[in-house]
Each structure stands twice: as structure tokens, then as C-alpha cells.
Amino acid sequence: MRAIVIGAGASGMTAALTAARLGHSVTLIERQARVGRKLMATGNGRCNLTNTGASPEHYHGADVCFMRTAMEKLPPEEALEFFRQIGLLTVTESGGRVYPLSNSANSVVDVLRYALEAAGVELHSGDRAVEIRGSAGDFRVVTEGGARLGAEAVVVACGGLAGEKLGGGRDGYELLKSLGHSRTALRPALVQIATAPEYPRALKGIKADCALTLRSGGSVIARSAGELLFTETGVSGPAAFDLSRAVSTAGDAPLEMQIDLLRGYSLSQVLLHVSARRESAPQLPCAELFTGALHNRLGRMVVKYAGLDAAKPVSALTEAELSRAAAAAKCLVLPVRGTEGFAGAQVTAGGIRTCEFDPQTLESRLVPGVFACGEVLDIDGDCGGYNLQWAWASGALAGRLGA
Ligand SMILES: Cc1cc2nc3c(=O)[nH]c(=O)nc-3n(C[C@H](O)[C@H](O)[C@H](O)COP(=O)(O)OP(=O)(O)OC[C@H]3O[C@@H](n4cnc5c(N)ncnc54)[C@H](O)[C@@H]3O)c2cc1C
């Protein structure tokens, strides 16, 4: 069969390779000059290509069960075997995050590129698919450059809106909408959270291991834990990314983020610690109360946040002031203003409705012969390699072209 795959990102390259290995004649259309441009930027240039703990609770969408077949056919260990066979050695780090042993995302793109060449996939790059015409068994994909490419099956693997400079855009949604498909609301996820800037700006560049709680109107709406990075406009890093989906989808109600800077210690343990400091280092200025427990700048900021006089000696702190200091370290509250939007996002929450596709094949229920995979569908994962795992698994299933 002749097949066209639109989009040479993670899912599209996997789909094209799978189809070609099954003996189909495959053309892979890529809007950008090179394949896998976004992949090269993943994991800060290291590409966190999967997570050994990938399971449904790490994914979101209207129907997460939709992904079950794809993930059963290509679970993380199979994805790693697939990569090993095409030449990639990997290393598994804490939290089950898997990276190329080379520490370079380019290695992932290179092995995929060579495998595509070896399998005889024809690459049509630097040109954008703008229309899918025809119906089952007789499709024509029209490109901006004027090409009219015929095929019996088409795989839409155009990705989502996240990371615009790296290839994110609306094309996948528009191409599928033109065939009668519909989508859910699109929101940025795995993105920096914008907060009231006063404290983050002063702490810019500092990382801390924290527990975060997101609250709306007094109720907890999401929690996360892990590394937090303070930025000019708010907070970033894995712990912030994991809350960002909830920020994006929370609506207009005011949100606040509570930061526990000493998550391994209870409030009473922190209180004991600062009380002991008052005894053991009475001459220390109050600004240094948390020196040794927190990054120095962070400790000073907690003292300021608690409203203590930084110059006063620790010995002069009252019980109430010590309690305020301990409480501030366990619960520093930042009003949340939103997220940094799609340009800075790693993934799109929402997408083409999965109920319009057969989960066993990823074939359209509306237009037989059309398949979709990856981020264009209404599935998104947590931070930690889950989104690429979905891209490989769904690409491999769609690339079977219903077989
Ligand atoms: C900065 C950044 C870091 C990330 N880090 C990680 C990470 O470490 N681990 C992880 O699991 N996930 C990560 N992600 C998310 C992950 O990269 C995506 O979820 C994944 O790439 C989606 O794969 P995809 O194939 O659906 O889309 P993409 O990889 O976005 O590929 C879509 C491709 O289609 C092309 N295209 C679009 N429209 C057309 C058209 N009309 N014609 C032709 N071609 C078209 C695009 O140019 C693009 O190459 C990161 C994302 C970003 C932005």
C-alpha cells in the first residue's frame, strides 16, 4: 500500500518506519527542513525518551483508556528494545527517566533518520501539507509547494501547539477538522507558571526540592513534588510543570501556590530546628536563621517573608517569631497569574477527540484510511518522558495502517 505520513516528529517517524518495515511504500512529509527538530530540544537537549513507570495515571485527556492498546503493544521496555535495535544505547535515571547514553538528543534523531533511510522511506521535507483530499483507498495530499501526493492511507502526525519555534502549530487540527473531526479545548501544559514576581525574581536561578500545593478558593486542586526553579516571572522545573496543567485548566478563579521548602520535615521538626539555632547560635543575625538548611538566598527570603527583622540577633526572636519563620519555610504562598502559554509549553493538553478514532488501530471512525498519532490527539502526559512514550507507542500503532 502507498502511505503518506504528515509530520516527521517523534510519532510520525515511528509511524513511517513501522509502515515501511511492513512493506508499505511510505512518503514522510515534513514542513521544516529537517526531521525531528523538536526532538532535538527535548529534555534540555538530552531527550528524556521514555519512562519505565509509564502507566495510565501519568496521562490526561477525556478518555485515557483510549491509549491502552498502543501502550500495551509498545510499553517502555519495548520502546527501549526498538531503540536498541536501531543503535541507541540508553541510561535509566532516577524516577525511571530514560536518556540516551550519549546524553544528546541528536543521537535519538540520528538513529531514527538512519533507520528511515534504511527502510526506504521517502522524505519530502521543507514543504507543508495543506489539504487531504479524497476518501478511503484514494487520498491526495496537497502541499504548499504544489505537490499532489497520492496514497491509499494517510497518517496525521503533526503534533500540537506547544513549542511553536520547534514546529508546534495548528495544522494537524485543521487537516483533521477538514475531514469532519473535532477537538477539545487546547491548553498549554508542562510550562512555567507565572506568579506574583517579587519573591521568584529575587530568587531567580535558585533550585529547591519542594512540595507544591495549588489551591483555588480554599480547595486543593493539584499537588506535586520535586525540583522547583525560580525564574524572573514565576516558577519552572519539574514540580512546577506538573502543576501547570491544573493552572491552565482551572478557569478564572484566583489560584495560589503553597511552597513547602522543607518537605522532608514536619512543621514541628522545623520549629525544633530553628529553636535549636536560637540556643546554639544566639549571636547570628536573623537573616541567617535557615543557613545550613536552605540555599542562603532562599533562607533570607523566608525570613523576609515571615516579616522578621533580618538584622536582629537570633537570640532576640520570640516564640511567635520562630513559629512564623518555621511556617513560612513550610508554606510560602505565591498568587498564581497563569502560565507562560504555548510558546514555552512542552505539550498541549487537549486535542482531536479520541472517541472519533478506533483505539485498536488509531484509524479514523469518520474517514477510513486516515490515522492519527502523537500530540495531535487528546492525550498528554506528565513531565518525565511520558509524552515521548505516547508518541512512540501511538506512532508504532498508527504505522501498522490497520493491520
Ligand atoms: C522544549 C520541549 C522539551 C520537551 N522535552 C520532552 C522530554 O524530555 N520528554 C518527553 O517525553 N517529552 C518532551 N517534550 C514533549 C514531546 O516533545 C512531544 O510531546 C512530542 O514530540 C510529540 O510528538 P509528535 O510526533 O506528536 O509531534 P512533534 O514531535 O511536534 O512532531 C510534529 C511534526 O510535524 C511537523 N508538521 C506540522 N504540521 C505539518 C504540516 N502541515 N506538514 C508537514 N509537517 C508538519 C512539525 O514540523 C513537526 O516536525 C518536550 C517538548 C518541548 C517543546
Image (cartoon, grey):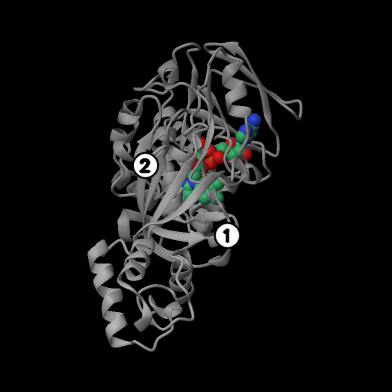
Please indicate whether residue 194 sits to the left or right of residue 103 in the image. Answer: right
User: Mark 1 or mark 2: which comes first in sequence?
Assistant: 1
Judged from the image, the quadrant occupied by ligand 1 is top right
- Counting other residues with Cα less than 10 Å from the Cα at mark 1, is it few (<14), some (14-19), or many (20 or more)? few
> Closest to the observer: 378 or 156?
378
Q: Quadrant of residue 176?
A: top right
Please indicate whether residue 95 sits to the left or right of residue 3 in the image. Answer: left
Callout 1 amino acid = Glu
Callout 2 amino acid = Ala
Please indicate whether residue 272 sits to the left or right of residue 159 in the image. Answer: left
> Closest to the observer: 123 or 392?
392
> Closest to the observer: 138 or 208?
208
Which x, y percent locates residue 91?
A: 35, 61
**Residue ID at (41%, 47%):** 242
- Counting other residues with Cα less than 10 Å from the Cα at mark 2, is it few (<14), some (14-19), or many (20 or more)? some
Report if residue 134 is visible in the image: yes
User: Residue most toward the right?
Assistant: 146
> Closest to the observer: 187 or 102?
187
Location of residue 137 with respect to 279 vertically, above or below: above
Which x, y percent locates residue 94?
A: 31, 60
**Residue ID at (42%, 79%):** 286
Mark 2, residue position: 222
Location of residue 264 with respect to 241 vertically, above or below: below
Mark 1, residue position: 198
CA–CA distance in space, label 1 to label 2: 23 Å
Tell me the SS state at disc 1.
Answer: helix
Which x, y percent locates residue 179?
A: 58, 14
Tell me the SS state at disc 2.
Answer: strand
